[in-house]
Image: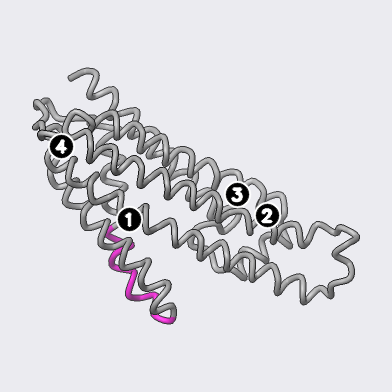
Amino acid sequence: MNSIKCNARIAGVFYFLFIACSILADQFARIGFGDPAAIVDKIMAHEGQFRIGFILGLLSALFFLLAAWALYVLLKPVHENFALLFFLLNLVGVAVQCFSMLPLLGAQLLFSGANYLKVFPADQLQGLAVFFVNLYKSGFMIAQLFYGSWLLPLGYLVFKSGFLPRILGILLIIDFLGVLIWLFQFFLFPAYPLISYPGLVASAIAEFSLTLWLLIIGTKDHKPALIKAG
């Protein structure tokens, strides 16, 4: 049980670092939910802050992957195949997110002052930068397909574990639905962002609750409910 509590707290630390870096990345560079025009303005006016935010965005992806690894170690005894499934889904999501951040570098390079860019008028450079940022936003949302999907097996294993509260598992499954609604709203109904707001609130509640429980409580003093793999 001490080992399980230790693994739970390691997962909580990595999840907390992921959330903290994500928030700071949005504050420094508007990476995350930032409006494309606001991101371009940040690149033009505060390049140093944007670079810090970009690094924090990469670190958030790394810490998210490490949190998934720690949760895999924690929940593997419950059901190895489902644990491997949510870890792989998270891994693909992290890869897609990191790849989608490359256009942000392209947008930043447009304002580097390089000689080969002087043939473009300033308004064209700004328009291209907005295009690159929109490309990043689309890639970020594609990553949500995998970030949302990993929550379903994760929530199921948390619910069945016996050493984590069942309510956390239920919240994570609701989070899964909320993220998918956000994804479909972004691509199918971009003019109606209100559709995604209830799901995003549920996501915040679920992931903050999981993080705080893992950090503060760890696990309940209860034997895990093992599920036969296969």
Label 2, residues with CA under 10 Å away: few <14, some 14-19, many ≥20 = some
Of callouts 4 and 2, the N-terminal one:
2
Q: Are marks 4 and 1 in contact (CB under 8 Å)?
A: no
Separation of residues labelled 2 and 1 (CA atoms): 26 Å
Instruction: Determine the CA span between mark 3 and mark 2.
Output: 12 Å
189 vs 150, left or right, is right
Q: Earlier in the sequence, mark 4 or mark 1?
A: 1
Q: Which residue is mark 3?
A: 53
Q: Secondary structure at mark 2?
A: helix
On residue 148, which mark appears? 1
Query: In the image, which residues are magenta?
Result: 191-202
Q: Residue at x 42, y 73 (%)?
A: 187
Q: Residue furthest bottom?
A: 191
- Which residue in the protein does label 4 denote? 230
Which element type, helix, strand or loop, lies under badge 3?
helix
- Tell me the mark number nearer the camera, choosing from 4 and 1: 4
| Front disc: 3 or 2 | 2
- Disc 1 residue crowd, few under 14, some 14–19, many 20+, Cα 10 Å: many
Amino acid type, mark 3: Gly
Asked if the stretch drawn in magenta spans residue 199, the answer is: yes
Query: Dot 3: few (<14), some (14–19), or many (≥20) neighbours within 10 Å?
Result: many
Which kind of residue does numbered mark 1 sit on?
A: Gly
Three-letter amino acid code at disc 2? Leu
Judging by the rendered image, the residue that carries numbered circle 2 is: 105
Q: Amino acid at mark 4?
A: Gly
Q: Quadrant of the C terminus?
A: top left
Q: Which residue is depicted at the point 59% across and 52% down? A: 28
> Between marks 4 and 2, how big is the CA–CA gap?
44 Å
